[in-house]
Amino acid sequence: MDAPVVDAEGTAEITYGPPIAMLAEITHRCPLSCPYCSNPLELTKRDGELPTEIWVDVFRQAAELGVLQMHLSGGEPASRRDLEDLVTACRDHDLYSNLITSGIGLTEKRLTGLKERGLDHVQLSLQGVDAEMADLIGGYKGGYSRKMDVAGWTTSLDLPLTLNAVMHEKNIDRLPETIDLAVRMGARRLEVATVQFHGWAVKNRAALMPTREQAKLAGQRVAEARERLKGVLVIDYVPADHHADYPKPCMGGWGSTGLNIVPDGRVMPCHAAHTIPHLVFENVRDKPLADIWWKSEAFNAYRGFEWMQEPCRSCPRKARDFGGCRCQAMAIAGDAAATDPVCIKSPLHAQLQEAAEADAMSDGTLTFRTMPV
Ligand code: SF4
Ligand code: FES
């Protein structure tokens, strides 16, 4: 593609090039059971995962295609014994490697070894600001204390540390403590992500949906902390879109900057793309990655503007938010090409907000993630 795509009226333009970042979900296995897990209900078992040699070859293909950053994720990527070989492959192909981890499965020795193999960055999840909250949400006793150890080893090894805190009804009021903790842990960056309802998390909407007031206060707190902590901590913020008027530009636009490979080798434009039933995802076992990126039907399904319906098609914001999230449109409107119902111009916007208010007001019990054997 590598050229601008212009709409029929010539008023909006998107340029497509190669992907910059790849999320390699190397396993679905995970020792935690977070209720907001966005992985699919149906997880890939160990014997369905891509073997080391295929991942290594995929990393080579990704680098040739133009990928610069490799996010090693899961599940818990440390559950794979060949993590070291995969980090080596990233280094061999000049890919910046980021380990997205709960910390469980890492020891000081293993992390030191990973750094020696070329690991560039650690992104550690934070389920709460103290052991009581973190171990409850993660469903793993002792998880918080291990996380603190991993953060300490990471900074002692001089590896940049990012913390990833999912905010929801049960912890969003403790955002100021989360920010203070990130500073104390020596993180350079904190990602404050309001819970998104994909995969397993859908089961927990009523238990996790923050109220409109909570979401608004969180936004103000982030803005205040960003100002106060300039030069100390960078804060990325994913606001609560169920209480917003416009959607986020999900994935920066479908098939535009990033791709995900799931444990069994299927390649997807985003984390939840498998929820769009008519799309068929090609597999790196069968096709070169570059062909999948440039030519596959799934990647081309929502590129450009031709697929858009009204009100997106004639909307001046369409090159800014690309009509929002295709997976959310699928989940709520039943049509992945519909306007994301988060948008105030969507006929389903009022219904979405009412449902969010109702969930926020109800006291759902948490259903914890269960893992495949
Ligand atoms: Fe974005 Fe579509 Fe809403 Fe316009 S109508 S703001 S393009 S989601
Ligand atoms: Fe799939 Fe937003 S999660 S497009």
Image (cartoon, rainbow, N blue to C red):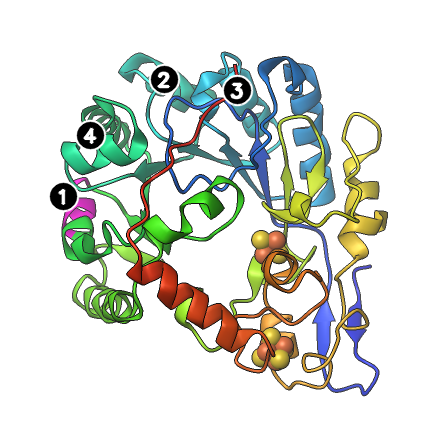
Which residue is located at x 45 percent, y 26 percent?
Answer: 370
Q: Which residue is mark 1?
A: 184
Q: Which residue is mark 4?
A: 148
Disc 4 versus disc 2: distance between alpha carbons? 13 Å
Residue 43 on image: x %, y %:
58, 28
Q: Which residues are magenta?
A: 180-185
Counting residues from the start of the chain, the first of labels 1 and 3 encountered is 1
Badge 3: residue crowd in 10 Å (few <14, some 14–19, many ≥20): few
Q: Which residue is mark 3?
A: 372
Of badges 1 and 4, nearer the viewer stands 4
Q: Is residue 311 above or below residue 209?
A: below
Callout 4: CB less than 8 Å from ligand 2: no
Magenta stretch holds residue 145? no
Ligand 2: quadrant of the figure: bottom right
Q: Nearer the viewer, residue 293 or 113?
A: 293
Counting residues from the start of the chain, the first of labels 4 and 3 encountered is 4
Label 1: element kind: helix
Disc 4 versus disc 3: distance between alpha carbons? 27 Å
Residue 152 on image: x %, y %:
20, 29
Disc 1 versus disc 4: distance between alpha carbons? 10 Å
Callout 2: CB less than 8 Å from ligand 2: no
Label 4: element kind: helix
Counting residues from the start of the chain, the first of labels 3 and 2 encountered is 2
Q: Which residue is mark 2?
A: 105
Question: Do tag 4 and tag 2 residues touch (Cβ < 8 Å)?
Answer: no
Badge 1: residue crowd in 10 Å (few <14, some 14–19, many ≥20): few
Task: Name the kind of residue labelled 4 in the image.
Answer: Met
